[in-house]
Amino acid sequence: MWSSEDNDQFIEWWRKTKWFHEHDRKNGYTEPKIIWGSPKRANCWPNIYEGAACLDGQPIVVCKRCSKALKHPAVGTGNSTIERHFTGKDCKKISRARGLPQITIEESFRAKV
């Protein structure tokens, strides 16, 4: 997982991954469009960790509520996938089993439940 404390080490590792090099060549970018740790405005971000898959470096996010890995929104899925995930039955079921509170009414409205 990415953290501000380990940013330099993470970026150094990530730039050596298979995903980084394939994405870089495929799209003609000098660097993929992910800015690790940049300020996120959507309400879903406090419940998410940013990171990359260990095997190939594909950018992912991990739900803090149920630990499910999802494709990173910057890779083309946007925040809607994360918002749908929070309202899905699997995340809710695991969250309840872990004793976590339900999402708030405000979070529900923003996730369009």
Image (cartoon, rainbow, N blue to C red):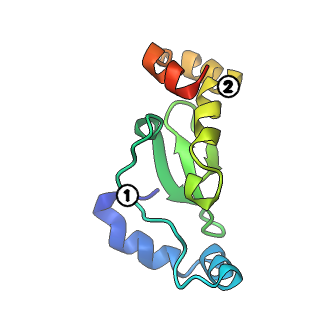
Mark yes or no: residue 109 visible: yes
- Residue 75 in the image: above or below residue 101: below
Task: Give how far across and how far down residue 36 sits, in percent.
Answer: 42, 62
* Number of residues whose C-alpha sits closer than 10 Å to that of mark 2, classed few (under 14), some (14–19) or many (20 or more): few
Secondary structure beneath dot 1 equals loop
**Nearer the observer, 30 or 92:** 30
Q: Which residue is mark 1?
A: 37
What residue sits 61% from the left and 19% below the top?
Answer: 113
* Number of residues whose C-alpha sits closer than 10 Å to that of mark 1, classed few (under 14), some (14–19) or many (20 or more): few
Separation of marks 1 and 2 at Cα, in angstroms: 26 Å
Residue 9 quadrant = bottom left
Residue 75 quadrant = bottom right
Q: Which mark is residue 80?
A: none
- Residue 30 in the image: above or below residue 92: below
Secondary structure beneath dot 2 equals loop
**Nearer the observer, 106 or 20:** 106
Task: Give how far across and how far down residue 61 sits, in percent.
Answer: 55, 49
Amino acid residing under circle 2: Gly
Q: Which residue is mark 2?
A: 88
What residue sits 55% from the left and 74% below the top?
Answer: 32
